[in-house]
């Protein structure tokens, strides 16, 4: 398997970034929806902090993924795809790249502005340049909360699109993102 993308399939690096980010985002969305229901304040604080640390990790990996993707060859869409499908796929992809950056930033701003910065082995990870500010914390919180719903919708659309291509259209769009598939052997 090749490290870099070709015009027919995704390379190992893109696939690794994609699946790592998918796991991180799905985990963050799930925990984000559930962590407010934890009754134990110490446990809730620990879960919130883990959520924040994973969010910052997602920001770092998402930044690398976005830079890698913007500088890499893109596999061509199947010729059988309608123009609206290729446009929707492209828009969804760029939205997801943007969300990998904006969502963690909004959470980090919210945490820093509300004096609840993430901490990692005793080191406070406050976002540089962000003052303590209730109004700024509320803006970050609103952006973070609304984006969670939008991200969930775009991820669902992205997933449904991949499944449609695999099961209904029977093309290799989904297979190209898997680590082992016949699509990878066509090169």
Image (cartoon, rainbow, N blue to C red):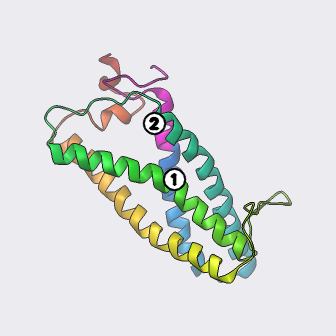
- Residue drawn at x 47%, y 31% is 71
Residue 81 lies in the magenta stretch: no
Q: Is residue 8 above or below residue 34?
A: above
Reading the image, the residue beneath label 1 is 100
| Residue hosting label 2 | 70
Q: Residue at x 30, y 25 (%)?
A: 183
Decide which of 109, 181 is in the foreground and name it. Answer: 109
| Image quadrant assignment for residue 63 | top right
Residue 38 is at least partly visible in this image? no
Q: Earlier in the sequence, mark 1 or mark 2?
A: 2
At x 20%, y 32%, the residue is 78
Count residues near mark 2 (Cα–Cα under 10 Å), then give few for <14, some for 14-19, many for 20+. few
Look at the image and tell me in which quarter the N terminus lies.
top left
Where is residue 176? Give x, y as percent. 33, 31
Element under disc 2: helix
**Is residue 141 among the parts visible in the rendering?**
yes
Look at the image and give the residue range highlighted in magenta: 2-19
């Amino acid at each position: 398997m090749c490290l870099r993308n070709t015009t027919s399939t995704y390379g190992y690096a893109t696939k690794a970034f994609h699946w790592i980010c998918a796991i991180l985002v799905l985990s963050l969305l799930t925990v984000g929806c559930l962590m407010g229901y934890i009754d134990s304040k110490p446990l809730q604080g620990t879960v919130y902090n883990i959520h924040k640390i994973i969010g910052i990790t997602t920001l770092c990996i998402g930044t690398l993924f976005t830079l890698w993707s913007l500088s890499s060859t893109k596999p061509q869409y199947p010729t059988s795809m309608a123009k609206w499908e290729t446009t929707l796929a492209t828009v969804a992809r760029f939205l997801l790249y943007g969300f990998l950056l904006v969502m963690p930033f909004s959470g980090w701003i919210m945490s820093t502005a509300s004096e609840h910065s993430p901490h990692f082995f005793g080191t406070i990870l406050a976002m540089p340049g962000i003052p303590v500010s209730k109004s700024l914390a509320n803006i970050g919180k609103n952006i973070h909360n609304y984006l969670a719903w939008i991200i969930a919708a775009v991820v669902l659309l992205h997933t449904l699109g991949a499944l449609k291509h695999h099961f209904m259209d029977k093309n290799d769009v989904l297979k190209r993102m898997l680590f082992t598939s016949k699509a990878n052997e066509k090169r």
